Image (spheres, rainbow, N blue to C red):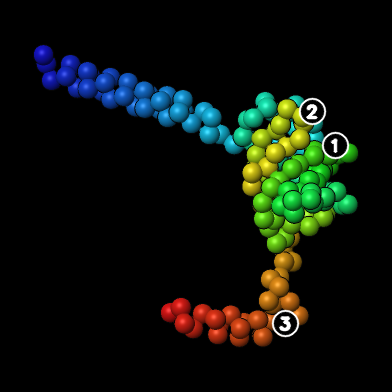
Amino acid sequence: MKAKHQRLVLVIIALVAIIGAGLLAAWSLRNQANYFYLPEQMASAPPEVGQAVRLGGMVKAGSIKTEADGVTVNFLVTGNTADAIPVRYSGILPDLFVENSGVVAEGSLGPDGVFMATNLLAKHDENYVPKELEGMGTDQAAKMAAETTVGLK
């Protein structure tokens, strides 16, 4: 076989291997995709029951209800419309989780239409200040930060 034909065969084999690896990776990750839904999107075109998705929106005021076990929390997530999606979460709530704040809930839609969250991510605005630094001036906060990082160097 000529060298020209050998190179052509090697290029074809390499292309088939690359395409095969890409298809194999796509097939193995097909169930790992985590789609993001807004409340109005979930209300109009809900995902399949049990499909892992993320639901993002605002926690509706007055909707946070803690069950008797003290760990399970039910609340509503709203968006730009009147649509509100009921969410149930069992676990420790993030410190920033409050009414009228942004939240991203990871989980799946249950058969009863309630979103079963396995993880909650609370969002904050650009004016967020940690509790430890509330009421401090910029100079005091910088001094405190410098004191806490001295032992880290």
Q: Position of residue 33 (x, y in %)?
A: 56, 34
Viewer-closest of 91 and 20 = 91
Do the numbered discs 3 and 2 sit on residues whose CB atoms are within 8 Å?
no
Q: Earlier in the sequence, mark 2 or mark 1?
A: 2
Q: Residue at 82% x, 51% y: name it.
A: 64
Residue 3: mark in rendering = none
Q: Residues within 10 Å of mark 1 (few under 14, many from 20)?
A: some
Q: Residues within 10 Å of mark 3 (few under 14, many from 20)?
A: few
Q: Position of residue 98 (x, y in %)?
A: 78, 57
Q: Residue at 81% x, 44% y: name it.
A: 76
Amino acid type indicated by mark 2? Ser
Do the numbered discs 2 and 1 sit on residues whose CB atoms are within 8 Å?
yes
Task: Look at mark 2 in the image and give the residue it sits on.
Answer: 44
How far apart marks 3 and 2 lie (CA) works out to 46 Å
Give the residue at the far top of this rendering.
Answer: 1
Q: Position of residue 118 (x, y in %)?
A: 64, 44
Local secondary structure at mark 1: loop
Residue 127 vs 120, above or below: the answer is below
Quadrant in the picture for residue 49: top right
Residue 38 vs 22, above or below: the answer is below
Quadrant in the picture for residue 78: top right
Task: Look at mark 1 in the image and give the residue it sits on.
Answer: 83
The reply to whether residue 72 is visible in this rendering is yes
Do the numbered discs 1 and 3 sit on residues whose CB atoms are within 8 Å?
no
Task: Look at mark 3 in the image and give the residue it sits on.
Answer: 136
Q: Earlier in the sequence, mark 1 or mark 3?
A: 1
Residue 45 vs 40, above or below: the answer is above
How far apart marks 2 and 1 lie (CA) works out to 9 Å
Q: Residue at 11% x, 13% y: name it.
A: 1
Amino acid type indicated by mark 3? Met
Viewer-closest of 43 and 116 = 116
Q: Give left or right: position of 138 versus 153.
A: right
